[in-house]
Each structure stands twice: as structure tokens, then as C-alpha cells.
Amino acid sequence: MVMPYQMLVDAVRGRAPIILGEHIRDDQFQPATIDLRLGDTIHAIGASFLPRPGISVADYIGKVSQYSFHLSRDKTHHLDVGKTYIVPLAESCAFPDQTRMFFSPKSSTGRNDVFVRVLVESYPHFDRTPWGFRGGLWLEITPRSFHVGIRAGQCLVQGRVKTRESHTLTTDELLRAHTKYGIVFDSFGKPLDKLRAEDGKLHFHLDLQRDIVGFRAKRPVSKQLDFSVSSDTYQPRAFWHPIPRPEEGHIVLNPGDFYLLATAELIRLPSQYCGELMPYDPTAGEFRAHSAGFFDNGFGGKFGTTGVLEVRENALPFAVEHGQPVCAMAFEQTFEVPERLYGAEGSSYTQSGPSLSKQFSHRYDAWTFAYWASKL
């Protein structure tokens, strides 16, 4: 099963910790994940890589590093669009044999099109550790739409700790959970009678009938989006083109562009379940519908929250229509109901409608005609 908040606290602060790091902050603990901090050294690398047994990450960096510099907690450092960097994370692992960790970008990382993935020493896979892993973690960072600013100690990625007992709900278990608790709602907050659920995954569909159906990242952008700023700092106009409701009933996704779109359904995670958006099915279109995949217990509050999709088309211009299936979510149980649920401690995405990342002012209003018609 998945470790909830109180078990993650024990994993760090118990007498035999399995997640190690100096001065891990209270705000790093989430209902079913732990936020992981950037260390104090950054390397610009000429190529991504996967570690292999017998060759350390440091050895690989020595082969592909172009330059390195100190990453400060007090000064923002500029990362260029299209450039790949690697940073050691401040946390490390000391897992028993039955335990491992999986990783996903934080929501604001994904919504700003910053591609991140975790590397593990001597393990040829991204974004997960082997069972019983003991050692350090590295984060690969590639800004793809905007120049970004970062500091040491910031959290761009999160980890979910699982045991061998972990398993996703079956389709029947998922449907029973929806009947009992309510997981998917229409735009009015009414639980849906009919769900599309297959192979233990719940499918969500594209909404192209709201005022503003989404956004396309501006290219090129000369401004830097600083992750160290407080919330509500940037104006959406400086970074995004709005996409109004299409008269033709469809929009075209162009290769190389980055889009934020929204689900037609509202999503709600009951207190004993966490979720994960799964990789896209290439037979349904050569696009990726998400980067940040973890949804914690309590997400969506009482009546659900619109899912925001981080979309990239990978091959040819591709038309998508209202109601088209675009992503699927799998669900798992945590060992216990977390003592802290999503939204209870000032979480960033708690309203029912879609939102830009927390760095933007008017991040909910930007999904309306009124915002773009105003002088805000």
C-alpha cells in the first residue's frame, strides 16, 4: 500500500528513518507524498542519460557536463529553455527490502512545462527506485516553454512511498468506490451515473465548451518565470495565449507547442484513496496529456475539482474534440486515512474550476472571457 502523511513523518523523524535529509520541513509532507528539495550544486549537461550498474551518476555527469555552478538558497539562478540540467536532491533513501519510491513532478512544475525526472544511482529507470534502495537521488530538469529561475531547497518533484502490498484498484473496486463515496462529478457537482472505467483505470474527457478552453504557451518568451516568487506574481498575458471556445467544435494541437486544457469532469479523491494519471495510450493519439501525475487523498474537496491537462503533441498536427477521452487515472489505497488531507493546510488548487500554476495572479479568472476583456 501507499504510505500516508503520518507514516511519511515517521519515515523521516522516527527512530529508524528510511528517508534521510537535514532539516526536512513540515511543509514537505503531503497526504500521500513527500516533496523533495533541490541540493546546492547544478550541472548543465549536453545529453540526458540513464545510470547503469557499476557506473555512478557522478561518472556520467563527468562525461556530459558542460559547466557546473553552486545553487544558492538566497539567489535565483536562471535556467534556459531547451537546456538540460541535473541537481542532486537533498533527500536520500535507506529503504527496507519491501519498500520503494515513485516520483512525479509537482503540479506547478508540470503546469509550467518544466520537464523533470528522477535518476537513481546504478538503476537504469527514471522516476522510481528499486526495492530496498539505499542511496542518493538526482533530478534532471529541462525547461521547455519558459526560462525559469530556481534556488536550492525548492521542491520541483515529489515522491510516493509504496510497499509490495501496493496495488491499483480493479475496475469493480473502482466502481464500488464511486458508488459509495463519489469520485467523478459533472460541472454542476452532481455524481456521474455512468463512468468509463477499463482495466482499473478511470477515463476523463476533454472540455471544449467553457469560455476559455485552455492556453498555449507563448514562444519565444524572453521573461523568466521564477519558481522562488510568492504566489500570484505573474500576469497570464505575459506567458500564455488563451484558446476561446472553438466554433468548429475542435482545436488543433501543433507539434512543439505546449497546451493547458481541462477535463469535462470534476475529480474528487476520497480520504482513503490516492490517484495517479497514467501514461497516454499512443493508439488514442500521439500526444501526452499530463506531466504531473500524483493526486493525493482529499483532492477535490466535497464536490470535485476540474483536472488540468498538460498536453504536448508529439508527431503531426492533431485535432481534438469536446468529450474526447484524453487521460486515465488509477487509484490506490493508503495504509490509513492521512491525518492531513489535501486542502486542509492551504493547498494550491482547491477551487472547483481549472487553474494556472500558483505563480500566476488571476489564475482561476484567466479561464473566463471577462479576464481577457479586462485590463487586469
Image: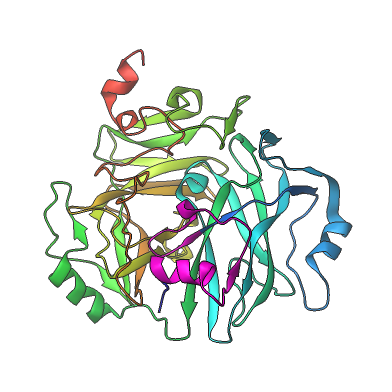
Place of residue 281 in the rendered image (x, y in percent of width and height, measured from the top left)? 45, 65
Residue 100 in the figure: left or right of residue 268: right
Place of residue 308 in the rendered image (x, y in percent of width and height, measured from the top left)? 37, 47
Quarter where residue 371 is shown:
top left
Return the residue nearer the eye: 24 or 103.
24
Please tell me whether residue 213 is drawn above or below residue 338 in the rendered image.
above
Identify the residue at image location x=32%, y=55%.
342
| Residue 214 in view, yes or no | yes
Residue 299 in the figure: left or right of residue 3: left
| Residue 317 in view, yes or no | no
Place of residue 299 in the rendered image (x, y in percent of width and height, measured from the top left)? 30, 56
Quadrant in which the C terminus appears:
top left
Identify the residue at image location x=60%, y=25%.
223
Return the residue nearer the eye: 151 or 58.
151
Quarter where residue 220 is shown:
top right
Range covered by the magenta-colored residues: 5-34
Residue 123 in the figure: left or right of residue 46: left
Place of residue 328 in the rendered image (x, y in percent of width and height, measured from the top left)? 36, 64
